[in-house]
């Protein structure tokens, strides 16, 4: 499921926003008078070129992701390098037109989208783009090749992630955590500082104060107002997170004792089942209340008992969207998607959704296994595909989600509807085996260990980077500021002291790769807002977490109306089209987990809260 880590969907969307390279580069326009009419002409030329480029670029990206070898790597590298140079050119030209009077709302919006299309803009001076690309490539490659140790032996990134989720020996957890952060993060500290300097210079060229301001400008509101919005959302959900933190800290203290995990203060970051303490579901077995953790069924076992294979799982996911009134997926989806891992070549297995021709060439790329997690992932990924098709009549620059949190949230909110009731309706679960209400706390706690636990981490990564880009966090204080924010928002602390020879932010992929992260925080909040709206439209009256809107065409029609807008209108209008509200809100998430919060408050009574 696309939650953390850079998705290939994001890559495809990034490529789709790149300028045309088809044998000729766009003509330079400095000599053209900066008028509203000239801006209209520039946008029309740029949009056509961008659209023309996006198809072969997406095809190259698909081939590289599904057939990895030296040749496809070289082809993809060529597209990426030419894309960066030309994307900068278009963005700089768009910046020249953006402030002239008399622009139509459509032209002004498209100019801003072009200016915002680069996450790490290079300055136009000779050599800057090459140096920036070299730095980001070197850091990303170092991350990809990075290793920690376990029992003194090297262990790669994917294996160390898995081991952090299953190992319960605190000494071994500490070894993996420290070795990964020391080996991967610390060596890139100098490169990261240099990258910040160059990208900030590029942001100024585009008319922004710094890169952080550029990133916050992509939300149809003043950058400072957007930062305040994220703070407001956090304040809504913070009491829920604090209650979960208090409970989990108590259970970890029961497991490990005071020497390893104190009853007060922060939680040791390496004890939470994840390298970055961003999701805690892997330690559910340590915190589940007796009996409540047994839900009475296992979706993966049900799939196997009913003879499901990966294709049938995807067909079932398609059936959910069809039940809402969406047209079936095109036949090419079934002939061109990578649904299972090929036996004859290397591929990227990370699940992603693609639209290769901006019309109907929809595909997913997975290495599907018959289990409950992949069943959820399929419903999630198809959400991207149906979103892509819904907005395919929009002009090229509007072929995207209303904001970068929407695309992830669509699939996530549909996946929330995989409830026991839904499993009964599709014939996977017998009605007699639907868990009783006394299992709800276990169900909600398991959900919260991932969805609620993630919230502060999803927020603080960009809080740290905004400070770095603005200069309020200096290079000689990178590590201290990172740990201060982790303590402030997450209430976690590293297992050992960290000084300024370290660079723990670099041990999280999105930081060296320059991938904005606030989108994931927004998606976690928006998915519950969408889900709550759909359940109300469906007339659901029971506990929110048991709602399924499967088969409700009214929900489908309203959802389609929002999806069709793409990025053509400010996101509050898209949100209003489906939910009736123009404001993102964490209240639906609070309502969803309200029974758990009440239970946690009882468990936490008399125990210290906060850190």
Image (cartoon, rainbow, N blue to C red):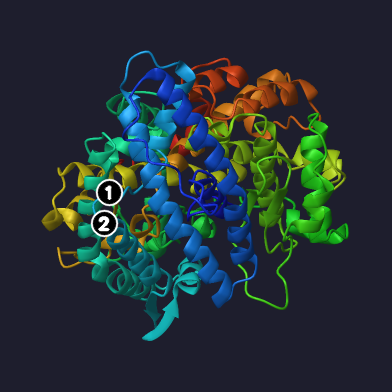
- The answer to whether residue 21 is left or right of residue 442 is left
Q: Is residue 163 above or below residue 62?
A: below
Check the image and report above or below for 561 versus 428.
above
Q: Nearer the viewer, residue 479 or 84?
A: 84
Q: Which residue is more in the foreground, 75 or 424?
A: 75
Q: Residues within 10 Å of mark 1 (few under 14, many from 20)?
A: some
Q: Is residue 186 left or right of residue 330?
A: left
**Is residue 175 shown left or right of residue 20?**
left
Which residue does the numbered mark 2 point to in the structure image? Answer: 128
> Which element carries disc 2, helix, strand or loop?
helix
For residue 324, which quarter of the picture? top right
Image x and y of residue 28, in percent:
38, 41
- Label 1: which secondary element: loop
Seen at 81% across and 30% down, the residue is 551
- Identify the residue at horizontal 73%, vertical 51% (top origin): 296
Which residue lies at the image location 27% right of the left edge and 49% below the top edge? 124
Q: Which mark is residue 124?
A: 1
Please identify the quadrant where the C terminus is shown.
top left
Q: Is residue 141 left or right of residue 261?
A: right
- Name the spot of residue 510 as percent of width and height, x first: 39, 55
Q: Is residue 260 visible?
A: yes
Residue at the front extreme, as displayed:
31
Image x and y of residue 73, in percent: 53, 70
Residue 437 vertical position relative to residue 108 in the rendered view, above or below: below
The residue closer to the viewer here, 596 or 358, is 358
Residue at coordinates 19% horizontally, 41% vertically from top-left? Answer: 470
Q: Is residue 95 above or below residue 4?
A: above
Q: Do the CB atoms of the residues marked 1 and 2 lie less than 8 Å apart?
A: yes
- Residue 425: % across, % down: 85, 38
Nearer the observer, 567 or 41: 41
Distance in Å between CA atoms under marks 1 and 2: 7 Å
């Amino acid at each position: 499921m696309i939650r953390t880590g850079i998705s290939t969907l994001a890559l495809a969307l990034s490529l789709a926003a790149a300028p045309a390279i088809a044998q000729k580069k766009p003509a330079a326009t400095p000599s053209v008078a900066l008028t509203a009419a000239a801006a209209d002409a520039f946008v029309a030329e740029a949009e056509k070129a961008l659209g023309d480029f996006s198809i072969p670029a997406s095809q190259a990206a698909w081939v590289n992701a599904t057939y990895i070898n030296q040749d496809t790597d070289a082809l993809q590298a060529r597209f990426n390098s030419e894309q960066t140079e030309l994307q900068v050119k278009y963005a700089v030209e768009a910046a020249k037109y953006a402030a002239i009077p008399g622009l139509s709302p459509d032209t002004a919006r498209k100019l801003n989208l072009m200016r915002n299309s680069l996450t790490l803009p290079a300055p136009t001076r000779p050599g800057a783009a090459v140096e920036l690309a070299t730095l980001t490539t070197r850091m990303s490659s170092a991350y990809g090749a990075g290793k920690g140790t376990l029992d003194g032996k090297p262990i790669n990134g994917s294996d160390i992630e898995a081991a952090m989720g299953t190992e319960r020996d605190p000494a071994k957890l500490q070894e993996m955590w420290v070795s990964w952060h020391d080996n991967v993060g610390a060596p890139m500290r100098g490169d990261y500082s240099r990258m910040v300097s160059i990208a900030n210079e590029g942001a100024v060229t585009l008319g922004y104060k710094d890169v952080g301001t550029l990133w916050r400008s992509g939300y149809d509101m003043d950058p400072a107002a957007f930062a305040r919005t994220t703070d407001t959302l956090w304040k809504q959900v913070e009491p829920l997170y604090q209650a979960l933190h208090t409970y989990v800290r108590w259970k970890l203290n029961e497991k490990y004792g005071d020497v390893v995990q104190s009853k007060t203060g922060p939680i040791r970051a390496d004890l939470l089942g994840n390298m970055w303490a961003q999701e805690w579901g892997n330690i559910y077995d340590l915190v589940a209340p007796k009996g409540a953790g047994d839900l009475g069924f296992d979706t993966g076992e049900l799939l196997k008992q009913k003879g499901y294979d990966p294709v049938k799982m995807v067909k079932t996911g398609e059936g959910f969207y069809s039940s809402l009134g969406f047209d079936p997926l095109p036949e090419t989806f079934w002939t061109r998607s990578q649904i299972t891992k090929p036996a004859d070549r290397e591929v990227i297995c990370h699940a992603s959704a693609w639209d290769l021709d901006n019309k109907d060439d929809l595909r997913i790329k997975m290495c599907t296994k018959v289990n409950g997690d992949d069943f959820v992932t399929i419903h999630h990924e198809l959400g991207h595909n149906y979103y892509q098709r819904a907005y395919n009549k929009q002009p090229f620059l509007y072929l995207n989600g209303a904001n970068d949190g929407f695309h992830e949230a669509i699939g996530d909110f549909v996946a929330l509807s995989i409830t026991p009731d839904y499993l009964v309706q599709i014939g996977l679960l017998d009605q007699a085996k639907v868990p009783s209400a006394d299992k709800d706390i276990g169900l909600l706690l398991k959900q919260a260990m991932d969805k609620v636990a993630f919230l502060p981490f999803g927020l603080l990564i960009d809080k740290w980077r905004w400070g770095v880009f603005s200069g309020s966090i200096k290079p000689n204080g990178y590590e201290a500021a990172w740990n201060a924010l982790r303590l402030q928002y997450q209430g976690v602390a590293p297992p050992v002291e960290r000084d300024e020879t370290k660079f723990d932010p670099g041990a999280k992929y999105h930081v060296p790769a320059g991938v904005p992260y606030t989108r994931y925080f927004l998606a976690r909040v928006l998915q519950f807002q969408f889900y709550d709206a759909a359940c109300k439209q469906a007339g659901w009256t029971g506990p929110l977490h048991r709602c399924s809107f499967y088969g409700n065409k009214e929900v489908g029609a309203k959802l389609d109306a929002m999806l069709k807008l793409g990025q053509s209108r400010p996101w509050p209008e898209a949100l209003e089209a489906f939910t009736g509200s123009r404001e993102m809100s964490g209240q639906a998430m609070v309502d969803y987990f309200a029974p758990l919060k009440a239970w946690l408050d009882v468990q936490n009574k008399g125990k210290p809260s906060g850190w």
